[in-house]
Image: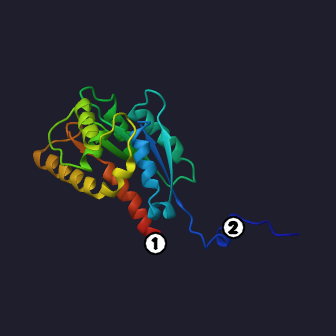
Amino acid sequence: MARRTRAKDLTRKAGSRPELKTVVIFCEGEASEPDYINELKRLPEIRRSTSIKIEIAPENGVPLTLVKEAIERKSDKEVDECWCVFDVEWPDNHPNLDKAIRLAECNDINLAISNPCFEIWLILHFADQTAFMDNATARRRSCGLDGRTGKRIDATKYIPLRHEAFRRAKDLTKRHRSAGTSFPDDNPSSGMGKLIAALERGALGKGG
């Protein structure tokens, strides 16, 4: 009787092709955030090491909803990491932000939070921004910097400048820490750099 092929046997046969790390990223927005992440996926070093899947929040999705969906998805053994990308929103903050963050921390869900909104991360690719901003101001400045007229972005303008944005975001974090400013009053700020750093570390770990 032929011996049944086991999963380990299949793994050995496929050994010449390294297994990709699977990262699922849950996004609150359906335009600029996915545009940006999809372009990030195209970087050769990340493409060789990581399979990135993007999940868009249902209509009127809020951070707590995203985190709960990420927890459910992380139970899949094929998923290595889950990230939630969401905004704080000003002048009206999202509800249950603190609860969403605590729930994520307790369930090993990674967060990339932008305050007030994702546009602050886009701004940091081109310029410093230290003054407080509400959503409308951030969006106006972001559109002024890249010349777009709608929500979609040309992410090819951004990805080459991602490390500059990360440096500026880290400077903002230091500035808030020195001032004793804590979440959700750490406006402006963005944790998107942490997501990029994690993906690029994964690429290095895979020999990319």
Q: Residue 10 — which label?
A: 2
Q: Amino acid at mark 2?
A: Leu
Q: Is 89 in front, or is 81?
A: 89
Q: Do tag 2 and tag 1 residues touch (Cβ < 8 Å)?
A: no
Q: Is residue 13 left or right of residue 114?
A: right
Q: Closer to the N terminus: mark 2 or mark 1?
A: 2
Q: Position of residue 89 (x, y in %)?
A: 29, 32
- The secondary element bearing badge 2 is classed as helix
Identify the residue at horizontal 27%, vertical 50% (top origin).
125
Q: Position of residue 96 (x, y in %)?
A: 34, 30
Identify the residue at horizontal 47%, vertical 27% (top origin).
59
Where 82 falls versus 11 (above or below)? above
- The secondary element bearing badge 1 is classed as loop
- Find the distance from the CA under tag 2 to the CA under tag 1: 22 Å
Q: Quadrant of the N terminus?
A: bottom right
Identify the residue at horizontal 44%, vertical 43% (top origin).
34
Q: Is 64 in front, or is 13?
A: 13
Q: Amino acid at mark 1?
A: Gly
Circle 2: is it few (<14), some (14-19), or many (20+) Cα within 10 Å?
A: few
Quadrant of residue 147 in the image?
A: top left
Q: Residue 207 — which label?
A: 1
Identify the residue at horizontal 65%, vertical 68% (top origin).
11
Q: Position of residue 169 (x, y in %)?
A: 23, 50
Circle 1: is it few (<14), some (14-19), or many (20+) Cα within 10 Å?
A: few
